Image: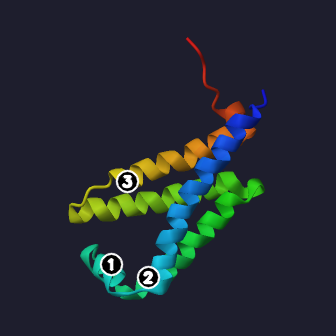
Amino acid sequence: MAASGKIVWGGRVISVLASLMFAMSSFMKFKGGAEVTQGMTHLGLPESLMMPLAILEISCVVVYLIPATSVLGAILLTGYMGGAICTHLRVGDPFVVQIALGIVIWLGLYLRENRLKEIIPLRRL
């Protein structure tokens, strides 16, 4: 069953908004600066990981935004968020934002991707 145009566009908007969050985070890592370095230090990550994390993050976003590879991109971003949750949990920081972003990644994809609706159908009681 194909989704209506409004649902698909809603999924696209949600996906783009989630992607912009990752893109902003990646850009901040590319740019560097005192705040980013301080954040990395707080999380127990060496400054030398900033560039590899930025490249990994933006690469996952690109894979997520390409329709043919969007499911793989969502899986990769979910793994990335799992690492972020683990890192925040280890230092005692809240990680609700990371969980919410993971849910939004899949919500956007679910709404715009009919293949997922066939694999994971929503049923009415």
- Residue mark closest to the camera, 3 vs 2: 3
Identify the residue at horizontal 24%, vertical 61% (top origin): 93
- Residue mark closest to the camera, 3 vs 1: 3
Quarter containing the N terminus: top right
Residue at numbered disc 1: 40
Residue at numbered disc 2: 50
Identify the residue at horizontal 67%, vertical 63% (top origin): 63
Name the image quarter holding residue 72.
Answer: bottom right
Q: Is residue 41 left or right of residue 13?
A: left
Residue 56, position as x, y percentages in the image: 55, 73
Q: What element carries label 3?
A: helix
Q: What residue type is labelled 2?
A: Met
Looking at the picture, does residue 35 appear above or below residue 119? Answer: below
Q: Is mark 1 on a helix, strand or loop?
A: helix
- For disc 3, the neighbor class at 10 Å (few under 14, some 14 to 19, many from 20) is few
Mark number, residue 9: none
Residue 36, position as x, y percentages in the image: 36, 80
Q: In this view, does 69 lie to the left or right of 29?
A: right
Residue at numbered disc 3: 97
For the residues bearing labels 3 and 1, Cβ distance under 8 angstroms: no
Quarter containing the C terminus: top right
Residue 40, position as x, y percentages in the image: 33, 78
Q: Distance between the residues labelled 3 and 1?
A: 17 Å
Looking at the picture, does residue 25 appear above or below residue 111? Answer: below
